Image (tube, rainbow, N blue to C red):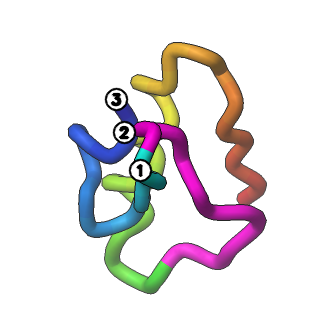
C-alpha cells in the first residue's frame, strides 16, 4: 500500500514487500513519504523527522 500511495518514494520487491531499508527522503517528497507510511498495513514504516 505504501508504494501504491507514493511510488516515487517507496520501492517494492518481487513479492510486493518494501525492499528499502533506512533511507533519507528526497527534499520535496516528505508529504508523499508520510502518506505512504500511513497506508502501510503492517505498520512497518517508521518516519523520523
Q: Give the crowd class for mark 3: few <14, some 14-19, many >=20 residues within 10 Å.
A: some
Q: Which mark is residue 35?
A: 2
Residue for badge 1: 14
Closer to the N terminus: mark 1 or mark 2?
Answer: 1
Q: Is 9 drawn above or below residue 33 in the view shown? A: below
Task: Name the spot of residue 35 as percent of width and height, x first.
Answer: 36, 39
Calculate the distance from the C-alpha at mark 2 to the C-alpha at mark 3: 10 Å
- The secondary structure type at the circle numbered 3 is loop
* Location of residue 44 by image quarter: top right
Magenta stretch in the rendered image: 15-25
Reply yes or no: does residue 22 show up in magenta: yes
Closer to the N terminus: mark 2 or mark 3?
Answer: 3
Residue 22 located left or right of residue 34: right
Q: Give the crowd class for mark 1: few <14, some 14-19, many >=20 residues within 10 Å.
A: few
Closest to the observer, 29 or 7: 7
Residue 27 located left or right of residue 43: left
Residue at figure coordinates x 62%, y 17% from the top left: 42
Closer to the N terminus: mark 1 or mark 3?
Answer: 3
Q: Is 22 drawn above or below residue 2 in the view shown? A: below
Calculate the distance from the C-alpha at mark 1 to the C-alpha at mark 3: 14 Å
Residue 19 located left or right of residue 31: right
Calculate the distance from the C-alpha at mark 1 to the C-alpha at mark 2: 22 Å
Q: Give the crowd class for mark 2: few <14, some 14-19, many >=20 residues within 10 Å.
A: some
Task: Name the spot of residue 33 as percent of width and height, x first.
Answer: 44, 54
- The secondary structure type at the circle numbered 2 is helix
Residue at figure coordinates x 34%, y 29% from the top left: 1
Residue at figure coordinates x 50%, y 25% from the top left: 40
Taking the view exactly as shown, the residue that stands out farthest to the top is 41
Closest to the observer, 27 or 40: 40
Task: Name the spot of residue 27 as percent of width and height, x first.
Answer: 43, 84
Reply yes or no: does residue 1 show up in magenta: no
Residue for badge 3: 1
Amino acid at each position: 500500500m505504501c508504494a501504491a500511495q507514493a511510488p516515487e518514494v517507496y520501492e517494492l520487491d518481487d513479492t510486493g514487500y518494501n525492499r528499502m531499508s533506512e533511507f533519507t527522503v528526497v527534499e520535496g517528497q516528505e508529504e508523499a513519504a508520510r502518506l505512504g507510511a500511513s497506508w502501510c498495513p503492517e505498520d512497518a514504516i517508521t518516519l523520523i523527522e
